[in-house]
Amino acid sequence: MKMLTGLLAPSEGEAWLFGQKVDARDIATRRRVGYMSQAFSLYSELSVRQNLVLHARLFGVPQATIPQRVDELMTRFGLHDRPDAMPDQLPLGMRQRLSLAVALVHAPELLILDEPTSGVDPVARDAFWQFLIDLSRNDKVTIFISTHFMNEAERCDRISLMHDGRVLASDAPAAIVKQRDSRTLEEAFIAYLKDADPAEADAVAAPAVVAAPDGPSAQPRGRRRGFSFSRAFSYSQREALELRRDPVRLVMALFGSLILMLILGFGITMDVNDLSYAVLDRDQTTLSQNYALNLSGSRYFVERPPITDYADLDRRMRSGELSLAIEIPSGFARDVQRGTPVQIGAWIDGAMPQRAETVQGYVQGMHQGWLIDIAKTHFGQDIAAGAASIETRFRYNPDVKSLPAMVPAVIPLLLLMIPAMLSALSVVREKELGSIINLYVTPVTRSEFLIGKQIPYIVLAMFNFLLMSLVAVTLFDVPVKGSFLTLMLATLIYVGFSTGFGLFASTFTRSQIAAMFFAMIGSMLPAIQFAGMINPVSSLEGVGRLIGDIYPATYYITISRGVFNKALGFADLQAAFVPMVVAAMVILGLSIALLKKQEK
């Protein structure tokens, strides 16, 4: 049936509708066909009337006739009393009639129905067939229907009995019964089945009923208590198999964090290099040119053509061509030689305040260095800073580069966000598919169910961690200086929290989109803003400081940076393990508590 409607490509053979070969791209033929699926295919967010109006517009029903056509169908199929009700609020029989009305809204010549009466009570089924008979006899609509009920098949003008994809017989119901010399259509069908596959017919024969032995009945076993690793592992195997069969999620699980690491590692940087600048030299002397050359010799700046006037300066800074403009006043060299105070103008693009502050520091450092050099070369004097001087030395990151600081912080962010998003889909997907009913009716406990689902994502997260560590060492040139075993142990605890957070999100959400967004926002934003990724937690105040103190990402970032940059081991970092263990246990406990073992 899906092949006739163009929903499925034919595996072999040909089908013809209205004298033409079936083509999924033929829109004209589709306008002449109405299709009703077994699942009804109604828009749950639209009311009864809105579903009919939408499908009328989709099939090109003239706008002026849509209200009349919708009212006609609602009256005909008994829907006029609840025009504003949502499909999920309707009884199954009314949903069935609404789906039929939707299929008929464009007045098709052929109506294809895929097991439309499955799951409907006998009274509603009989009423539905009255509608079909009326459509066939009075509206002259050809109806093509599939069914497992023999009493429904007997109402058709012509039927085909099928088994295992093969047509066993095709004729009018009465003719088929007569050909097999049977009393009913069901007996005729069974006879055809026996001829088609005798072994299967014998296998499905009803077994003999054996009386129960006399004697005391078996005592009911007590309810099994405690955690079953076997049941939890069964769910782990099922989840792993589901991941393998979903290539999109599998690729995201295996390589999503690696791709994001490359983007974030190269994209998030605090380094301020290759800043474009230009000089407005109003003095045009050797000394003023020496001052400009001192700036151009820095690796932080790239010189642009000189500025001609204030209008040129303003235009080029507005366009973003310049990040820094230096103005040297006229009489600069004369005033320096006389020892007269002179001011240099530095115009800095402040659109990005943090970068502007860094540029200001560069300019001040360059200016101070130039003054010391001029004092020595021109005046033979040393500018004494006092009895004692302070020499600054940077440990762990002597070049003060961003990569050694950001890469160990990006790994925690991705190990939090990606596993949380993936595990968040697991429980909600079961709710959407309806397979969550297995949790309700089996002796599996909530803890076995959630932990079993969590294990495959922990394994995937650990694999991602190893990949990202390899990329950090080889591509980003950030070596592991401390204990890698300590980092692996911390990662295992940390991904236990991140996958648990995803399960926590999935226990109280009802759609995969909602669960994924909650997991992404709830994990990523606190990690970036409050966990010390960019600003130290000690610089935060109020609620931000509280979140930073209790959030596990804070402590894992500390461990990651300690192992990568500071050559620390377990003895140095053991205090950071305790909050992560507590957080992982709390989030898993909350997930178990929120997951219902009984359907609402």
Image (spheres, grey):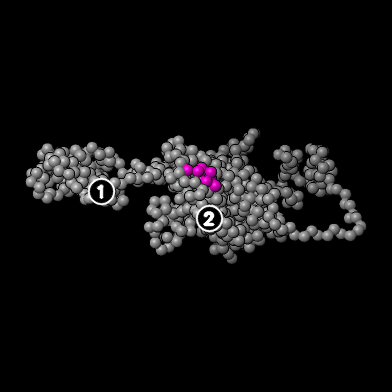
Q: Is residue 488 part of the magenta span, yes or no?
A: yes
Q: Residue furthest top?
A: 13
Q: Residue 484 placed where, x, y %?
A: 51, 42
Name the foreground residue: 516 vs 30. Answer: 516
Magenta segment boundaries in residue numbering: 482-489
The residue identified by callout 1 is 389
Mark 1: give few (<14), some (14-19) or many (20+) Cα within 10 Å: few
Q: Name the residue beneath numbered marker 2.
A: 578
In screen coordinates, is 464 left or right of 76?
Answer: left
Secondary structure under badge 1? loop
In the rendered structure, which amino acid carries the disc numbered 2?
Val
Whether 94 is drawn above or below 108: the answer is: below
For marks 2 and 1, the one nearer the N-term is 1
Taking depth in this image into account, of 172 and 508 the one nearest to the observer is 508
Instruction: Choose between 287 and 326: the one closer to the eye.
Output: 287
Q: Residue at x 34, y 41 (%)?
A: 399
Where is 573 relative to 21, above or below?
Answer: below
Q: Quadrant of residue 582?
A: bottom right
Please tell me which residue is depicted at 79% across the width and 47% down the height of the picture.
Answer: 185
